[in-house]
Structures are given as structure tokens and as C-alpha cells.
Amino acid sequence: MHEFLRNLPKVELHLHIEGSLEPELMFALAQRNGIELPYTTVREAKDAYHFNDLQGFLNLYFQGMSVLRNEEDFYDLAMDYFKRAREEGVVHIDMHFDPQAHLQRGVPLEVVMAGLLKAKQEAEDKLDLSIGMIMAFLRDRPAEEALHVLEQAAPYWKMLDAIGLDSAEHNNPPLKFVEVFKRAKQLGLVRVAHAGEEGPAEYIKEALDVLDVQRIDHGVRCLESDEVVERLRREQVVLTVCPLSNVSLKVVEDLRDHPLPKLLAEGLKVTISSDDPAYFGGGMLTNHIACADAFGWDEAVFRQLTRNAIEEAFVTPQRRQELMARLATA
Ligand SMILES: Nc1ncnc2[nH]cnc12
Ligand SMILES: [Zn+2]
């Protein structure tokens, strides 16, 4: 089964590129940029990666990314992950990135975009990996700031596959961002949002109704509302579920208690992603293996999850066909 999972052409719909920053690269970039870290060794950093909730993780996530200052840093960050993912048999990644987290530290949007776009181009040219770009807004920051960043990103609109909504969900309902998402829709941009990770099922409904999103990132708490489950099933809205993330952030106690099997049994369009692989114990292959071990799934289940992800990935029709063909022979 592990060999099958390694060879499966995996498609990742939910990945925060800043959450792929491994401690080894964090130390290298800190040194390159003369930045001091609160850790003295890689071991010490890894030992700090124990979280009680989403906020506990976000504090370290924002601290970790403080080493990213120049175009080259963003390029190295992304290439480092792309190479690792490719070695794990990943063939496509829809990548979230958080411009506000960099703008706040005085890093211009142009620097972030240049580094990430260069890595995307190189991955597509040389690694046989396709990359989607999701510019995410931090929901614990003011909506006016997000609106301003969306306008500032005008030179990049045509390079974006979607806008997203992430960071602390508690008390930051989708409704807060109605104007931002309305503007994005007016611009012809696709919309996705984190909802129902730590927040209630109601936020999933709100993201669909008010933000008109085409994807729900996480969405695991939908099971608390029959009405929301029915809606997700009827509309076959894709859920980008991140099993090891949910364990690390204590959304569930243990992977064996994870609602993934129930979500599948409900007929929902489920996919598997890694979210923040450097912080949550591993990438796509590790997440797949963990699910195989916890749930005893056979190959057919993983094929279905991968088919779901290929159908929903931000790729050209030709690339989608190519990925489907690869899945058929895996
Ligand atoms: N799991 C997560 N939830 C919300 N925002 C995030 N940003 C990075 N990872 C996140
Ligand atoms: Zn996420």
C-alpha cells in the first residue's frame, strides 16, 4: 500500500507555502539575512512544534516566516517544497500565500510575487509539477486592509487562480469579508475560504452564501449540521481536508477519531492535503500513509480522493486530462 501511495499522482489543493518552511531552511535564511531566531538548533525548533489550537500554531507560523525578506528567500522556500513534494509523487499544488504577513514586516508585494512566480515557472518547466496560486487574506486583520491589498495586487490579478481566507477563524466570520469577496468576484477571480476548521458549521454556510466560494478549506465541522452536509453533498462542494493538521491543532484527539470516513460515507467531495507540512509532521505522502494506517482504506478510496482533487485543481483542461490519464495507470 505504501508503494501504491508513493506512486499515486497526488494533487494537493490546500498548502500554505509559508507553512512548508522547514527549520533547516529557516536557520539558513536567518543566517543569510542576519535575523535572530528564538531557537538555537533545528531540534529545539522542532520540539517547539506542539500546539494546543490554531492560534498557538499561528504564533509560531508568523514568527517562522520572519526570515523571508528577499525575492531569493521566497524562491528558495517554494522550490524547497516543490522538490520535496515531487519526490513524494505530488503532481500538482494549489499554493496559498499570505501577502499581509509580509507587507506588515515591510516586505513589498513585488518581492513576494517575484520569488514565488519564479519558483512556479521553474517547477512547471523542469519538475513536471503544475502550481496554482491562491492569494489569501488574514481574517483576523481588518477587511479594509484586505481590500487594499487586493487592489494593490492589480498587476498580478491575471496570475492568480483564486483568492482565499485563512488565519484565526474564531470570531472572524466570513461575513466580515463580504466586500472583499464581492470585489474579487467582480474582477473575475475565483474564491475559496477556510471554514469549519475551528469555527462552526454556520461559517461554511456563510462562506458559500455570502462569499460565493467554490471550495471550502477544511470544512470538517460540517458534520455538526445536517443542513450544511446536505448542501455540500447536493452541490458537491469540494472540501480540502488536512488530516495531520487537524490532529496537530487538536481539532481531533487522534487520527482514528477523524471524521474523514464519515465525510466520505455522507457522499461529500473530499480531498486530502497537508496544510502546513513543516509544522504538522509531514507532506502529502505522510498524510496519505497515516490515513491508510488509521482507516484501513483500500486503493479505490485513494483513487476516488485523487480523482476529486484532479477535478477541482486549478489547471488547464489539457493538464487535467493528463493527470486523469496518469491516475488511470497508477
Ligand atoms: N490551518 C490553518 N488554518 C487557518 N489559517 C492557516 N494559515 C496557515 N495554516 C492555517
Ligand atoms: Zn490552511
Image (spheres, helix red, strand yellow):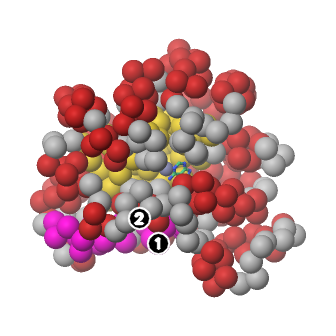
Range drawn in magenta: 276-297
Q: Does the magenta segment cover residue 289?
A: yes
Q: Are marks 1 and 2 in contact (CB under 8 Å)?
A: yes
Looking at the picture, tell me which residue is in the foreground, 225 or 7.
225
Q: How far, Cα to Cα, is label 1 from label 2?
A: 10 Å
Q: Position of residue 201 (x, y in %)?
A: 36, 37
| Residue at image location 12% in from the left, 60% down from the top | 300
Q: For numbered disc 2, what is the local secondary structure? A: helix
* The C terminus sits in image quarter: bottom left
Residue 55 visible in the shown view: yes
Q: Which quadrant of the view contains residue 40?
A: bottom right
Q: Is mark 2 within 8 Å of ligand 1?
A: no
**Residue 120 bears which disc, if any?**
none
Q: Which quadrant of the view contains residue 254?
A: bottom left
Looking at the picture, tell me which residue is in the foreground, 110 or 210.
210
Q: Position of residue 294 (x, y in %)?
A: 24, 71
Q: Tag 2 or tag 1, which sits nearer the N-term?
A: 2
Q: Amino acid at mark 1?
A: Gly
* The N terminus sits in image quarter: bottom left
Looking at the picture, tell me which residue is in the foreground, 101 or 173.
173
Q: Amino acid at mark 2?
A: Val
Q: For numbered disc 1, what is the local secondary structure? A: loop
| Residue at image location 54% in from the left, 20% down from the top | 178
- Residue positioned most to the top: 186
**Residue where numbered disc 2 is placed:** 247
Residue 188 visible in the shown view: no
Looking at the picture, tell me which residue is in the foreground, 243 or 311.
243
| Residue at image location 53% in from the left, 42% down from the top | 169
**Residue where numbered disc 1 is placed:** 281
Q: Position of residue 172 (x, y in %)?
A: 57, 35
